[in-house]
Image (spheres, rainbow, N blue to C red):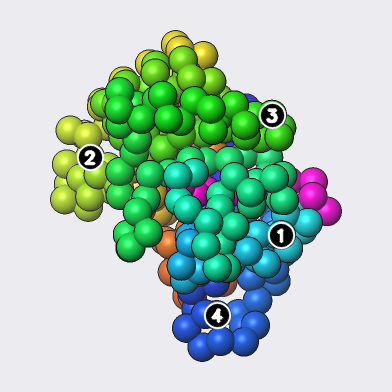
Amino acid sequence: MSCRLSVNLNKIAVLRNSRGGREPDILQAARACLDAGAHGITVHPRPDARHARHDDVLALAGLTRDYGVEFNLEGNPFAQARDGYVGFLRLCELAHPAQATLVPDDDAQLTSDHGFDFTRDAAALQPLVARLKALGCRVSLFADAGSEVARAAAIGADRVELYTGPYAEAFAAGNAAAALPHYARTARQAVAAGMAVNAGHDLDQANLGAFLAAVPGVQEVSIGHALIAEALYAGLATTVSRYLAIVAGR
């Protein structure tokens, strides 16, 4: 099976929230991406609701079910519930995403910028992974290249999502060849431990093809910031089509 593309729509919600109201409409953006052939939709609702919100999650869950595609819900499972945020596991209970991607981001963090320390975090993650799998969610854990991904398999994770920010930085600096072997090695270790591999963060049309060619077994890429930025110039349908060509190896 070729790699699949899940479009992260957080940036659509950021633009909407900067002005208030309903525009741009995150559901309309999701329909445009799915009509163009995207394999799924991702959002990462944070406790401060600065982009995707509780109502977005529920609406997108329904829309993706209608389209028969996967909904990937990202979040920190340790973030405490508060006004306007019921907590990540409760959101999963309400939305029943196909995939729950657990990410260790702090409340005030601008964006996800590191994976779990599995040596430190495995014991705390294990019961949460079990709860999510009992809901029928496939569970993916955010992981750095070079991390102890076999520990993720040992606590029941189905996948790891490789954090590709450092690769994107290396690619931009002309040093991709130095970074890619670390990702390839980690991907092979994940597969050997019985998991599948996802990837995401700062991937774009320029660097995605080289990553997929060098890193074996990547099942899914989740791309938001770059795709939405590129779509400002080319349109969502055209941009999604271009990414689909890359993930298909064309």
**Image marks 1 and 2: residues in contact by CB distance under 8 Å:** no
- Which residue occupies the foreground of this view, 231 or 225? 225
Q: Which residue is mark 1?
A: 58
Establish if 184 lies above or below 164: above
Q: Which residue is mark 2?
A: 176
| Location of residue 185 (image quadrant) | top left
Q: CA distance from mark 3 to mark 4?
A: 34 Å
Q: Earlier in the sequence, mark 2 or mark 3?
A: 3
Q: Which residue is mark 3?
A: 134
Task: Give the SS element for disc 1.
Answer: helix
- Which residue occupies the foreground of this view, 112 or 227? 112
At label 2, which amino acid type do we have?
Ala
Task: Give the SS element for disc 3.
Answer: helix
At label 4, which amino acid type do we have?
Arg
Q: CA distance from mark 2 to mark 4?
A: 35 Å
| Location of residue 20 (image quadrant) | bottom right
Which range of residues does the magenta coloring cover?
Answer: 65-76
Foreground: disc 1 or disc 2: 1
**Image marks 2 and 3: residues in contact by CB distance under 8 Å:** no
Which residue sits furthest right? 66
Q: Which mark is residue 16?
A: 4
Look at 30% across and 23% down and name the residue there.
119
At label 1, which amino acid type do we have?
Leu
Circle 3 residues within 10 Å: few <14, some 14–19, many ≥20: few
Q: CA distance from mark 1 to mark 3?
A: 19 Å
Establish if 77 lies above or below 121: below
